[in-house]
Image (cartoon, grey):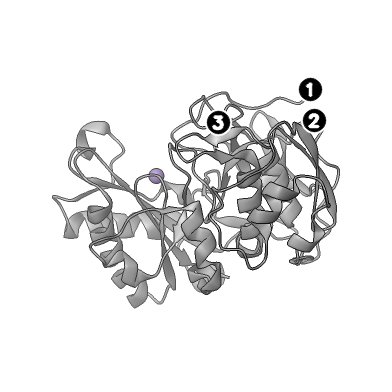
Amino acid sequence: MKALLGSVIPDVLGQVVCPFAVRLARVDGMPVELRELRLAAELTPNVYRPGLSVLLAENGRRSAGVDNLAMGETAGSVSVGGRTLRVTSPNRIVYPGEGVTKAAVIGYYVRMAERMLPHLRRRPVTRIRWPGGVTEPPFFEKQLPNGAPDWIETIDLTHSDGTVTYSLAHEPAALAWFAQQNALELHVPQWRWHGVGPRVDRLVLDLDPGPRTGLAECAELALWMKGQLDSDGLENVPVTSGSKGIHVYARWRASDQSQSTSEYAKSLADSAVEAFPSLATASMTKVEREGKVLIDWSQNSPSKTTITPYSLRGRDRPFVAAPRAWGEVADAGLSHLLMSDAVERLDEPDPLAVLL
Ligand SMILES: [Mn+2]
């Protein structure tokens, strides 16, 4: 059996991917487009219809946490974008606080696919899986597990300790299959594979509140960073992480830049610490984080990953890594969004679209 790498969530995901020793597996070199968005119509009749059809109804605006799947159904299949997926334990509660079932999680990802997939395309996906729901320990997984559907597109990346076959997410059914695997969190690098190698197309600054700080302090720093990014001509978007802090993303055109994203992000973090000495730190040590926001610029390393926008979080409640308008970040009432909020916002344009 292929190894499932790791059994705990490390603080920093990613590790030892060597971006220059990579070969492509089943990506065909062509741009991969969304094939099928009329998902509700494709659900197999009679199978999970009560739960999934509520969740997936095109015009439905019910909370994705509300799901009335008949008890006693233990497995079956569902059709998503022309793929048929086996679904096991659809009634299993994943988020006990809100009664969110696995069927609801699958429904969430299928609903969000149109919005998520353009940002995921050609990025290897590290999944964090919660097989026992969010009250039980998760494990993280890079290697495609045995038994994965053969239509899941993959990319082989050579690490210092061997080659890992990663999943790609190029169609709604891939997201549904991740959810079937209880992979609530999807993490990706800031580069996409482009035929001959990885190409960095965005940078991220992860604002992580330390003890005695919170979202408000992150927002203050994020707004300052927006000013810097704007004046450097880098289009930018804030994402409330759904965990604690804020991720500030910026579009990056490598050909326009003499620096790497890591160099740029580090200098921005250092400038923020200079401007806000009592509020910000760029040091990972625990002592220095007390009362401060850590500006983690290191996730721009090609070997690191960050939660992908619109991914659920494996927290006590179904929070989402949610792209926001800057006006919201400036609002004193800023808070993290839940999956139901994210679904409701599908009526609005994608704040992250400027990065595409
Ligand atoms: Mn973080």
**Mark 2 beta carbon near ligand 1 (under 8 Å):** no
Q: Residue at x 61, y 29 (%)?
A: 131
Where residue 172 appears, as percent x and y from the top left, is 72, 56
Q: Marks 1 and 2, how far apart in space?
A: 7 Å
Name the quarter where the C terminus is drawn: bottom right
Q: Residues within 10 Å of mark 1 (few under 14, many from 20)?
A: few
Give, as a three-letter code, the residue at label 1. Met
Q: Which residue is mark 2?
A: 146
Where residue 6 appears, as percent x and y from the top left, is 59, 25
Query: Where, by quadrant of the figure, is residue 42 drawn?
Result: bottom right
Asked if residue 46 lies left or right of residue 352, the reply is: right
Q: Which residue is mark 3?
A: 133
Q: Secondary structure at mark 3?
A: loop
Q: Residue at x 63, y 68 (%)?
A: 59
Where residue 224 appears, as percent x and y from the top left, is 26, 66
Task: Looking at the picture, tell me which residue is in the foreground, 201 or 127.
Answer: 127
